[in-house]
Image: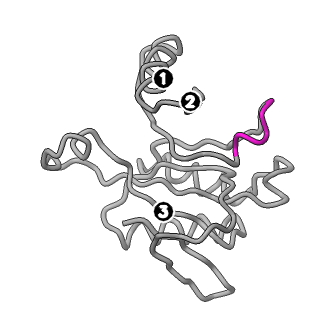
Amino acid sequence: MRVRLRLDGDRTELERGPYKGRNELVATFAMVTATSDDHVIELATRLAKAAGDKEIEIGPVVEGWDLTGTPRPEGAPLRFLLLRKADRASEAGALPAGVTAVLDEWKRDGVLGSARAWDDGPFTESKELIAGFSIIEAPTLADAKVWAESYADVLGDNEVDVREVA
């Protein structure tokens, strides 16, 4: 399941991909564990309302078993990424207070795996060109960089940034 959730007042609209290019800038993401597709849509709707967002993209986390074609292990969590799209406020560095409260609650309840605000860093244009990202667990930042270099070799002529996720 990959959908874009759009809020218009009290009305919620779901759009399934492929998408026509509109706002592709990612302001923040949250990786959440949900019990079903309906549950993750409820979570995304709550986050969008807390943020005052009009749109959040929802996508499943691609797990190791997805890449190898093996069956999903019994009891494995259903993990999704919620991508908040950038707007003038997020580009100015503002994170709505309601978002922090929702993320804190999800963390307490074991729903939130990780979350990150995308900062522009020294290369503001790179945020506009994100084709995807991988979340890995590595013992050190140096180990993550070694993995990223190997991954970049597989991708070919692409740049791979390494960022720590809390």
Say above or below: 6 vs 9.
Answer: above
Q: Secondary structure at mark 3?
A: strand
Magenta residues span: 122-127
Q: Is residue 166 visible?
A: no
Sequence-wise first label, 1 or 2: 1
In the image, residue 105 sits, relative to residue 146, either above or below, namely below
- Using the rendered view, name the quadrant where residue 159 is placed: top right
| Mark carried by residue 58 | 3
User: Which amino acid, by three-letter code, is at mark 3?
Assistant: Ile
Is residue 78 visible in the rendered structure shown here? Answer: yes
- The three-letter code of the residue at mark 1 reads Ala
Residue that badge 2 annotates: 160
Pointer 1 residue:
148
Where, quadrant-wise, is the N terminus in this rendering? bottom left
Q: Residue at x 54, y 31 (%)?
A: 157
Disc 1: CA contacts within 10 A as few (<14), some (14-19) or many (>=20): some
